[in-house]
Image (cartoon, rainbow, N blue to C red):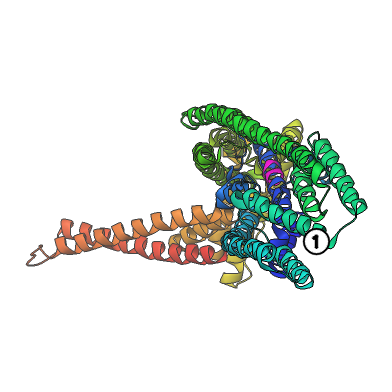
Amino acid sequence: MKAELIKKLEELLRDKPISEIIEEVHHVEDQIRAALEEARHRHLEAEEELHEGSGEEAPAESLSVQGGAGADEKEAGRTEPVKEKEMESAAPEKEAEEAQEESTTESEKPAVMTAEELEVMERRFKELMGIFNDRLEKYKAHVREEEEKNYEEKKKVIEGLREIITGEQNIGQAINKFRTLQRKWKNIGNVPASKYRELQSEYSFEVERFNYTLSIIKGLKELDLQKNLEKKQKLVEHMKALAGEKSIKRMEMMVKSYQEEWEEAGPVPQEKWEEVRDAFREATHKVYEHLRQHYDQLREKQIENLEKKKVLVKKAEEISGLNLQSPKKWTKHSREIQKLQAEWRSIGRAPQAQNDEVWEAFRTACNKFFDRKKAYFKELGDVRNRSKEKKEEIIRKALEWKDSEDWKPATEAIIKLQAAWKEAGPAERKDEQRLWTEFRGICDDFFERKKKYFAGIDERYKENLAAKEALIKEIESFEPAGDKKADLERLGTFTMRWKSIGHIPKKRMDEMNRLFRKALDGAYNKMGLKEEEKRVARYKNKIEGMLSARQSRSHDLRAEQRALKERLRMTRELIRQYETNISFFTVASGSSPLLDEAKKKIEKARQEALIAEEKLKVIEKAIKSA
């Protein structure tokens, strides 16, 4: 509907001259303003509902759609003095029309527009009204110039009538000239309203004088004069009845129409002329007096409206200066501002001289409030977004523990994440419920699995113990195949199977681990491995066990790698220190116990360094595969 109204306004400005579209543009302008105001109200309600769940309210729109140069110029144009053939519509009819438009708008219930769509439409509306007002001002200036020219032309017509009456002897030529001047008078057009009555009176006098003179000269019959008298007597009655007309617009239009008919009615009997003339003048005076009283009352009403609007300005300024620190308070005072705006719209115009000033003060106060509210909720939205990011990170961490059966660390981690969730604060309403549902589901799944697991833990412990005892016997029966690499890989699978079996009764844990290590050592001995090779093999089994863990694998492996590199660095540093110390020994012959001890330490450190290097290869390979 709003887009159609904008399109209609564009078509009016494009397809028709300004003189033909003034009233229609004002009508379309009122419809657009009402539609934009309704759209802003619906946008506010939608954002308030959107933020209700997290304790905030959406910002209301500013009052800018009601103001602007276009609106002021439009209203100013509607309170100009009455001009010839340009009477404005009456207030009652306008109010009925606006009520019908509001009813139609309410029933249509347009879809909620975004703040960006409203801004684009309002900007286009202001551009079009700016074009209209520019053209209207040019048109008014042109009309004033034309009216002054018309005034001078009509003065010449009146002079021409006088010359005919006083100078023309030929009746036929006098009649032709008179009719020519009459046509010229009618075709000239409007004159300034301030000069209209005096000029019209002069013209009427000369026309009456000409007609009276002509009727005498031509010897008009008394019947013709009587018919003219009857016409003018009817016009007197019409003019008297017009004083009771309720529509100001119709009154203004008809009083001029009756005056024109009066001038065209022709002469009346001389003895009746002053009577009927005075009767018509008196009836006309009453009509104009009624119009004057109407506009006097209108001015008094505008002064009363000005005082009411000043009170609203003061209230709006007080609210816009409040220091509000919660969404509820902003929502409460937003509604107060909206009530002030609604009351403002119901009051009506103030006097033209003060209307723009008081409107600007009210709009400034309202805009200040809504600008501050917008900034407050923007900052609040940033906080909500940070809370959202925190909760998304909490969910990612919870997912890492969701399927863990390492119950103690997993339970501690989940509980810490639940505490972190409470500290994170609420996210936006549209995100909060979704995030909470997901996080709660993860936690519920974990604790439900834990509950089921511990419900049958004794039986599983027995099963795991039996499985580990069987695995130890399998290792004890291990016989090397002769391929060292393949045999080590077979032994490595024993470690992974051991870790995958699960928990056993705590009182048997140390015993079973000791038996497992003993069985592995027996298998390594069957292969004829050196002590260094055994240590590397054990380390490889340890790393493979870490790889089979269900959480933090990459983190743990890299921590192990850093620790191993540090031990290797320290071992190499120790070797250099021993070698430096040896260089200070000076032995002439034989051996030195200190020197021999130092050499043994160097050899041992070198073996440790070699083992550390082999372990680094193992862990680097594991990191790549993790």
Residue 214 picture location, percent across and down: 79, 60
Residue picked out by circle 1: 217
Q: Which residues are magenta?
A: 37-41
- Dominant SS of magenta comes to helix
Q: From the viewer's perspective, is residue 221 above or below residue 331? A: below
Q: Residue at x 58, y 56 (%)?
A: 547
Which is more toward the observer, 447 or 42? Answer: 42
The outermost residue toward the right is: 223
Quadrant for the N terminus, please.
Answer: bottom right
**Which kind of residue does numbered mark 1 sit on?**
Ile
Image quadrant where residue 271 sits: top right
Residue 518 picture location, percent across and down: 56, 49
Quadrant for the C terminus, please.
Answer: bottom right
Which is more toward the observer, 44 or 557? Answer: 44
Which is more toward the observer, 302 or 285? Answer: 285
Residue 41 picture location, percent across and down: 68, 41
Residue 140 picture location, percent across and down: 59, 59
Number of numbered callouts drawn: 1
Q: From the viewer's perspective, is residue 281 above or below residue 478? A: above
